[in-house]
Image (cartoon, rainbow, N blue to C red):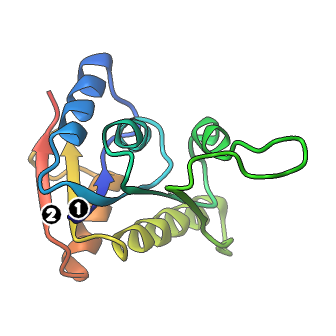
Amino acid sequence: MRRYVFTGPSSINKEQEQFVRDVVRRLSPPPSEITTGAADGVDTISCLEGLEAWPTALHRVVVPVAPHNEGLIEALEIVNQDGQFLGNERVQILRMPYIHGDDEANRRRRAYRARNRHMLEFGDELIALLRSMSPYRSGELMTMNIAADLNVPVFKILLP
């Protein structure tokens, strides 16, 4: 059993969505945990596919105090009118604390960096789905650099 963390572009097409689904379904060794970062695209697809393909694994979503897929979080936080949690007991939603910054752009960068570092604290391996094997400015590259600092192995996969 292995603890996987996923990173990848927040905007992907239908072919890439299916590719991400296939990657999640073929994880080996099987996951004990899957952690994602609450963004659209790879984060959302890997979370939802993971819930279906690996129902006994713990599915963790680390939510930054910055733009993220609110619809995914709402879907995972199903509650009844009395406020009781009705969602999957194998889902853990971790909300990052507010990060103060001198301007909004700097605060967001720091919020995403803190979220990415926290995600990696739960991982044995980072699965990085990439648009190119050449370095490009992105959250994926930031996450891979943090993984290197934390000695978390990175498995790079090129998206179609």
Query: In 3D space, how far apart are the residues under numbered discs 2 and 1 (Cα atoms)?
Result: 5 Å
Q: Position of residue 149 (x, y in %)?
A: 23, 81
Query: What number is the disc on residue 126?
Result: 1
Give the left or right position of residue 127, taking residue 156 as reference: right
Which residue is pictured at 32% across the width and 45% down the height?
Answer: 54
> Looking at the image, is mark 2 or mark 1 earlier in the sequence?
1
Residue 60 vs 47, above or below: the answer is below
Give the left or right position of residue 111, taking residue 6 as reference: right
Q: Amino acid at mark 2?
A: Val
* Foreground residue among 29 and 36: 29
Q: Position of residue 35 (x, y in %)?
A: 39, 58
Identify the element where label 2 is drawn: strand
Q: Position of residue 15 (x, y in %)?
A: 24, 18
Q: Quadrant of residue 22?
A: top left
Residue 158 vs 28, above or below: the answer is above
Residue extending furthest bottom?
Answer: 150
Residue extending furthest top?
Answer: 14
Which residue is pictured at 27% across the width and 32% down the height?
Answer: 21
Q: Which residue is mark 2?
A: 154
Residue 109 vs 146, above or below: the answer is above
CB atoms at circles 2 and 1 under 8 Å apart?
yes
Q: Quadrant of the C terminus?
A: top left
| Classed neighbour count for the residue bearing mark 2: other residues with Cα under 10 Å, few (<14), some (14–19), many (≥20) | some
Q: Is residue 63 visible?
A: no
